């Protein structure tokens, strides 16, 4: 049973440029089913009961701000794109007190409110530190595999380049959706920032946080997505067209007369 309900805050990562979109428009402002990608994510967060939303902006910050400004939205600036963990850390001063932080990507428009509710409830259950969503895919390729402990909770992420043949046979991947506790989340990110970066890119990865918590004896729940499409981010014009079709299918609206244009403006 879920424990005592906590305040829920969404931190939506929307700082990336999206070079593979081949457009000057910030990636999260490309439209699917007539709306910016990030608008679908914000609506899902609101429907899941998030009291506040923090949008982390970077590339095209002013455009993103203008497109999604609302009374329940605050903005954090990631001036340099130094990884997902670094992006989330920029929201530290905007998350009030104790809260469950739903970390979402602004380019994943197919995420459903009920998924976010389930993820938050698992994170808030007794004896659990946080939760992350996973998806089972037929061919995970070079993606990291999520390995589970005997009780089904999170054990660690095995990067494909370092994985054993047995680990490579696992088809469970990190979906990039998290429910993590504040303020401990931000304390751990600050610790990572002091210890890192020790990787070639000089970046801080959010995926290191569950591993750190697990090493400290915490339990992290694993939520299996019923629909792997909820984890699919839009990175190319082809992805955008697929998201457009999927959203229109959900809404029961006719397909676009032409493929959604990556040059479309929000104006």
Image (cartoon, rainbow, N blue to C red):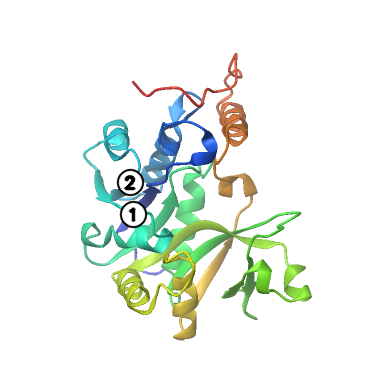
| 177 and 212: which is toward the camera | 212
Q: Is residue 125 left or right of residue 257?
A: left
Residue 109 visible: no
Q: Quadrant of the C terminus?
A: top left
Counting from the top left corner in percent of width and height, residue 253 is at 57, 20
Residue 73 visible: yes
Number of the front mark, 2 or 1: 1
Counting from the top left corner in percent of width and height, residue 122 is at 48, 65
| 22 and 95: which is toward the camera | 22
Identify the mark nearer the N-term, 2 or 1. 2
Counting from the top left corner in percent of width and height, residue 199 is at 48, 71
Mark drawn on residue 1:
none
Picture layout, residue 16 above or below residue 67: below
Picture layout, residue 41 above or below residue 189: above
Q: Which residue corresponds to mark 2?
A: 58
Picture layout, residue 167 above or below residue 70: below
Q: Residues within 10 Å of mark 1 (few under 14, many from 20)?
A: few
Marks 1 and 2: in contact by CB < 8 Å? yes
Taking the view exactly as shown, the residue that stands out farthest to the front is 200
Q: Secondary structure at mark 1?
A: loop
Residue lying at 60% horizontally and 36% vertically, measured from the top left: 239
| 55 and 41: which is toward the camera | 55
| 118 and 235: which is toward the camera | 235
User: Between marks 2 and 1, how big is the CA–CA gap?
Assistant: 7 Å
Mark drawn on residue 80:
1
């Amino acid at each position: 049973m879920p424990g005592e309900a906590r305040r829920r805050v969404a931190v939506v990562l929307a700082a990336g440029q999206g070079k593979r979109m081949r457009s000057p428009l910030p990636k999260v402002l490309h439209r699917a089913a007539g709306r910016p990608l990030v608008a679908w994510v914000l609506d899902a967060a609101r429907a899941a009961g998030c009291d506040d939303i923090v949008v982390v902006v970077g590339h095209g910050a002013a455009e993103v701000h203008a497109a999604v400004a609302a009374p329940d939205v605050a903005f954090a600036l990631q001036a340099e794109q130094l990884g997902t963990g670094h992006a989330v850390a920029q929201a530290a001063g905007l998350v009030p007190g104790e809260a469950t932080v739903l970390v979402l990507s602004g380019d994943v428009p197919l995420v459903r409110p009920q998924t976010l509710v389930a993820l938050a409830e698992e994170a808030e259950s007794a004896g659990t530190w946080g939760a992350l969503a996973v998806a089972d895919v037929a061919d995970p390729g070079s993606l990291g595999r999520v390995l589970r402990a005997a009780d089904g909770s999170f054990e660690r992420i095995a990067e494909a380049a370092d994985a054993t043949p047995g680990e490579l046979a696992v088809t469970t991947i990190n979906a990039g959706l998290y429910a993590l506790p504040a303020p401990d989340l931000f304390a751990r990110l600050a610790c990572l920032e002091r210890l890192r970066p020790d990787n070639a890119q000089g970046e801080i990865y959010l995926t290191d946080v569950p591993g750190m918590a697990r090493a400290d004896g915490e339990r992290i729940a694993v939520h299996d997505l019923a629909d792997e499409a909820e984890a699919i981010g839009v990175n190319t014009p082809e992805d955008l067209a697929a998201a457009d079709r999927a959203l229109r299918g959900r809404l029961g609206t006719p397909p676009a007369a032409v493929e959604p244009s990556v040059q479309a403006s929000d104006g």
